[in-house]
Amino acid sequence: MSTYIIYIIQPLFLLLLAPLFIGILNKTKACFRGYTGASIFQLYYDLSKLIKKGEVISASSSFVTKIGPLLTLVAAVSCAFVIPVFYTSRESIFGNIFVIFFTLGIIKFVTSLIGLDSASTFGGMGSSRELFISMLVEPIMFVVVTFLFIETKSFNIFTIASTNSTQLSFGPGHVLAALAFFILVLAENARMPLDNPETHLELTMVHEAMILDLSGKRLAFVELASAIKLVLFLTILINGFLPYGIAMEFNLLTIALALALYIVKIMILLFAIALLETTMAKFRLFKVPELLTFAFSIGIVSIIINHYM
């Protein structure tokens, strides 16, 4: 029974703290830029405010705009229940990494439909750009998953975390695959240098253009889903490539230590993203394929290195 409880506590922890992690990311960027910035709890305030507000829906919009935001949130929450956070077990029947990635893909697909459904030129432009980037990201995902399967002989993220948690050192192939996945995380979550999550300049928007016509609780659903999605991808990166210290037995001290290590790891990743977003400019759209081709290439190289070493 205790094991089942931890499978409920883990996702609840992730879901409740996802807005906080985004707040910490934004606060870190503000510190790098030399100003105070908003509170780390700002996203909680924004979500609360949006849920209480009314909303305006375009006369051109269909049921897609009405149910789409809720679908994105449901997809994000569902994935939170099938990935390890600070506890893992080889006996878990959940956690197929393909199912996780394709469920997360629902968020992007539905958001693109929302952009098209608004009958706005900006929404359509954002959707086309988002799907263009997604087309380039998918091969990277398949390459990284292939690497993890070759390394651990499993497609289950719980088993992958359990296997890699016993490794004290990793080869160059593992490092390259982790770098490829980190670039994938930036692309999937509309982060710099592929997209600027802070901009509302029409000609440069990608993700923000698709949700430009949303307001009220539907905008809150999409914003919360985006926050959860980023934390989910970072958690997969941590527990797929550097799960050292993750708990594999139901022991209070072990779980507390694993939780502390998880928070340290995700803070390091948030720091890295904040550093990137304050020191790099957004790429032109036609420069994006070059970065994603680089990620795909090092993913292929990681498989070759892993095979021969």
Image (cartoon, rainbow, N blue to C red):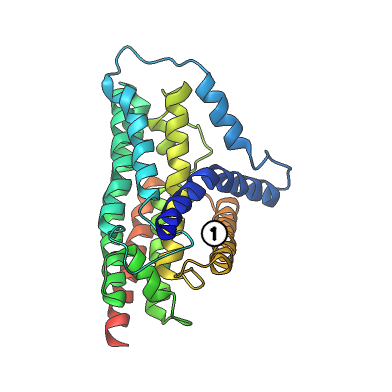
In the picture as drawn, the residue positioned furthest to the bottom comes out as 309
- Residue hosting label 1: 266
For the question of whether residue 11 can be seen, the reply is yes
Q: Residues within 10 Å of mark 1 (few under 14, many from 20)?
A: some
Query: In the image, residue 82 lies at what x, y percent?
Result: 35, 54
Amino acid beneath label 1:
Ile
In this orientation, which residue lies closer to the viewer: 146 or 89?
Answer: 89
Q: Is residue 196 left or right of residue 152?
A: right
Query: In the image, residue 20 lies at what x, y percent?
Result: 58, 45
| Placement of the C terminus among the 4 image quadrants | bottom left
Residue at the spot x=44%, y=54% of the render? 5
In this orientation, which residue lies closer to the viewer: 201 or 49?
Answer: 49
Query: In the image, residue 174 lies at what x, y percent?
Result: 39, 75
Residue at the spot x=39%, y=72% of the render? 162
Q: Is residue 194 left or right of residue 120?
A: right
Query: In the image, residue 123 lies at what x, y percent?
Result: 35, 28
In this orientation, which residue lies closer to the viewer: 259 or 47?
Answer: 259
Residue at the spot x=27%, y=59% of the render? 96
